[in-house]
């Protein structure tokens, strides 16, 4: 049964409480508490300026326009004073809004930077079991689209929600102070508004989660398609992949239409409620003016405040898509952050002062999640300074041994020790530095030759030159236009398979590990660089404890002891000469190697059967 990470399928992902999401988001704002407090004070000032303008309009109408005994000159002067005050409030409102927006943009950028770094560091710390079940495109969506959605929330939503919440409370207070009966009448519309908003919230949250999930599927499909474009073209699968992409895009289109439909109902309904409120105020306010219970200026101010009251609701409805999208993105980001590595770190990790190089596998059994065991009760010892070889057909469990030694996984049963220390108790960075690994597939950074070799090491020119000599890269690097500063990888110089292998040996020499593992490191080299690779292997293996997984006879014969694996167990062991005399699987593998059949994906039994047919 496959392990459930709670992240494999977003449609089945558990929904976090929205309050819990906001609480975790707020945790990232604590380092910027002072800036947030300043933004809150600016919100109060902005709200005061916005609400002050209708009050000035009321005073202007009642004092200087209608129902006044002042002469024309005094009325004109009063109107000019009120106009100047209104202009001053408008200018203040502009400056305060600009300052608040700039401040929150700065805070939002810093918070998003912190979340992005936190998320990336967390993903780097997860084990291979997690990555075996996760499409790369989905993880890319988390670190790009979802982070950007949260940024929109910090810069747009927080300002809107806080400012508008204060504005709504202030408007209600002013309306009650001006005319309590009319304000109570408007209050009757509030339950309808809240019901409309809550219903929209529920529908929009579901739709936005569906949209984000579908977008993640599209990103995953694109990543997988572009990664395998050569295979797709080779086997003529363009049409089927195009059909699948069309199906995914159609799903995204349908979900987006559902979003548009919900917004198309919600926003006009809010407009209808707004017009109903205006009509109510005009009717009842007009009657009170005729009865002498209300002034024209008060009615004008009332209508202005109603416009201000529905404006934040209208803005919230327009920005609700940002809110829901951001909350859905935050939910998915926190789900990813809540995933813990399947390889737990020790509470008190051991950091040995040195490494003697003794390796022991003691009754090791291992099965990948939900699968049959690939290693069964494997036991052997590698003495310090010894070079052993592990051979076997594809699928026999050779690479799994290396994955366990590097602690990409932990054994299902048994244990592995280095100098008597169980790997599960060792400091993981120390283990990875101590056990160097040269793999068949070499990852090349889009950087200079020197940066690709040094990685986290810092070498002086003399050390770097010696490493180039030992790894047989000196002549190649000398021929490059910018020597070790030449950019290789994506966007730079392309390396051959043999040159990549030499680069891998140079990396190992730069880190100088006490234990070295070669995992099929000579499988794909071309004949031109084969001699260079052999020399590099000789230099790299010298003075270390080595485990070599290889098919080439020249590499295997360097080993002092050879282990032969089949179906997850060790079936033979000894020196090359001893095993060849014994016959059996090892001799058969060597014969297949000479015939060029080994590595064709068939087991030795299948190959033997095929040779008899």
Image (cartoon, rainbow, N blue to C red):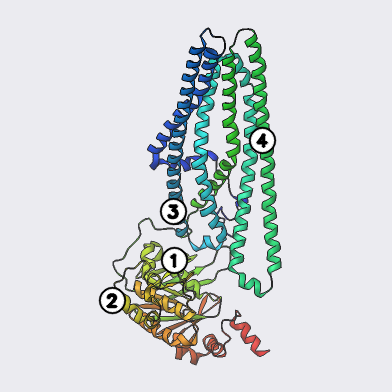
Could you classify mark 1 by the number of other residues whose Cα lies within 10 Å: few (under 14), some (14-19), or many (20 or more)?
Answer: some
Residue 168 in which image quadrant: top right
Q: Please say if the residues under marks 1 and 3 sit with CB atoms less than 8 Å apart.
A: no
Vertical placement of 544 versus 420: above or below?
A: below
SS of the residue under disc 2: helix
Residue 288 left/right relative to 554: right
Alpha-carbon span between mark 2 and mark 3 = 35 Å
- Residue 407 tag number: 1
Disc with the residue nearer the chain's start (4 vs 3): 3
Alpha-carbon span between mark 4 and mark 3 = 37 Å
The residue that appears at 41% across and 58% down in the rendered structure is: 345
Residue 443: image location, x then y, percent? 47, 71
Disc with the residue nearer the chain's start (1 vs 3): 3
Residue 384: image location, x then y, percent? 34, 77
- Tell me if I can see residue 134 in this picture: no
Vertical placement of 19 versus 407: above or below?
A: above
Vertical placement of 142 versus 384: above or below?
A: above
Q: Which residue is mark 3?
A: 117
Alpha-carbon span between mark 4 and mark 1 = 54 Å
Q: Which residue is mark 4?
A: 266
Residue 232: image location, x then y, percent? 65, 71
SS of the residue under disc 4: helix
Residue 299 left/right relative to 450: right
Disc with the residue nearer the chain's start (2 vs 1): 1
The residue mark sitting in front, 4 or 1, is: 4
Q: Please say if the residues under marks 2 and 3 sit with CB atoms less than 8 Å apart.
A: no
Residue 509 in which image quadrant: bottom left
Q: Which residue is mark 2?
A: 462
Residue 103 in which image quadrant: top left
Disc with the residue nearer the chain's start (2 vs 4): 4
Alpha-carbon span between mark 2 and mark 4 = 71 Å
The residue mark sitting in front, 2 or 3, is: 2
């Amino acid at each position: 049964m496959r392990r459930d990470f709670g992240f494999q399928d977003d449609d089945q992902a558990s929904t976090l409480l929205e309050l819990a999401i906001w609480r975790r988001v707020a945790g990232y704002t604590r380092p910027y508490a002072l800036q947030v407090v300043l933004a809150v004070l600016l919100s109060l000032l902005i709200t005061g300026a916005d609400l002050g303008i209708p009050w000035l309009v009321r005073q202007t109408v009642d004092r200087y326009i209608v129902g006044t005994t002042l002469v024309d000159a005094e009325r004109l002067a009063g109107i000019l004073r009120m106009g100047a005050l209104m202009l001053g409030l408008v200018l203040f409102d502009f400056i305060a809004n600009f300052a608040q927006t700039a401040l929150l943009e700065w805070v939002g950028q810093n918070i998003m930077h912190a979340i992005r770094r936190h998320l990336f560091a967390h993903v780097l710390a997860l084990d291979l079991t997690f990555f075996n079940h996760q499409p790369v495109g989905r993880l890319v969506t988390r670190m790009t689209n979802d982070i950007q959605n949260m940024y929109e929330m910090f810069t747009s939503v927080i300002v809107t929600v806080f400012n508008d919440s204060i504005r709504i409370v202030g408007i209600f207070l002013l309306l009650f102070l001006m005319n309590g009966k009319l304000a109570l009448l408007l209050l009757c519309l509030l339950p309808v508004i809240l019901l409309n908003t809550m219903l929209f919230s529920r529908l929009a949250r579901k739709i936005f989660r569906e949209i984000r999930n579908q977008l993640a599927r599209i990103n995953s499909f694109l990543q997988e398609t572009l990664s395998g474009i050569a295979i797709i073209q080779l086997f003529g699968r363009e049409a089927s992949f195009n059909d699948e992409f069309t199906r995914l895009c159609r799903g995204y289109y349908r979900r987006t239409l559902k979003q548009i439909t919900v917004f198309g109902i919600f926003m006009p309904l809010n407009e209808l409620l707004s017009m109903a409120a205006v009509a109510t105020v005009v009717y009842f306010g007009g009657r009170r003016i005729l009865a002498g219970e209300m002034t024209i200026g008060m009615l004008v101010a009332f209508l202005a405040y109603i416009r201000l009251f529905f404006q934040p609701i209208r803005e919230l409805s327009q920005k609700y898509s940002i809110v829901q999208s951001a909350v859905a993105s935050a939910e998915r980001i926190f789900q990813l952050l809540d995933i813990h590595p399947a390889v737990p770190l020790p509470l008190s990790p051991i950091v040995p002062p040195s490494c003697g190089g003794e390796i022991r596998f003691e009754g090791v059994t291992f099965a990948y999640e939900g699968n049959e065991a690939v290693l069964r009760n494997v036991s052997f010892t590698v003495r310090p300074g010894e070079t052993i070889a592990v051979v076997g057909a594809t699928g026999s469990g050779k690479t799994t041994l290396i994955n366990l030694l590097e602690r990409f996984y932990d054994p299902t049963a048994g244990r592995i020790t280095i100098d008597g220390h169980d790997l599960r108790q060792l400091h993981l960075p120390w283990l990875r530095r101590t056990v160097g690994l040269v793999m068949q597939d070499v990852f090349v950074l889009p950087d200079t030759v020197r940066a690709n070799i040094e990685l986290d090491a810092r070498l002086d020119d003399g050390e770097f030159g010696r490493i180039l000599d030992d790894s047989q890269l000196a002549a190649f690097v000398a021929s490059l236009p910018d020597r070790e500063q030449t950019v290789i990888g994506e966007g730079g110089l392309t390396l051959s398979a043999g040159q990549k292998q030499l680069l891998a040996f140079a990396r190992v020499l730069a880190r100088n590990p006490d234990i070295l593992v070669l995992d099929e490191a000579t499988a794909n080299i071309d004949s031109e660089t084969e001699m260079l690779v052999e020399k590099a292997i000789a230099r790299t293996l010298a003075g270390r404890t080595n485990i070599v997984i290889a098919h080439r006879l020249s590499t295997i014969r360097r080993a002092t002891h050879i282990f032969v694996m089949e179906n997850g167990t060790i079936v033979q062991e000894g020196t090359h000469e001893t095993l060849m005399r014994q016959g059996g699987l090892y001799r058969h593998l060597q014969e297949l190697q000479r015939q060029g059949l080994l590595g064709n994906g068939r087991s030795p039994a299948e190959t033997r059967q095929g040779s008899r047919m």
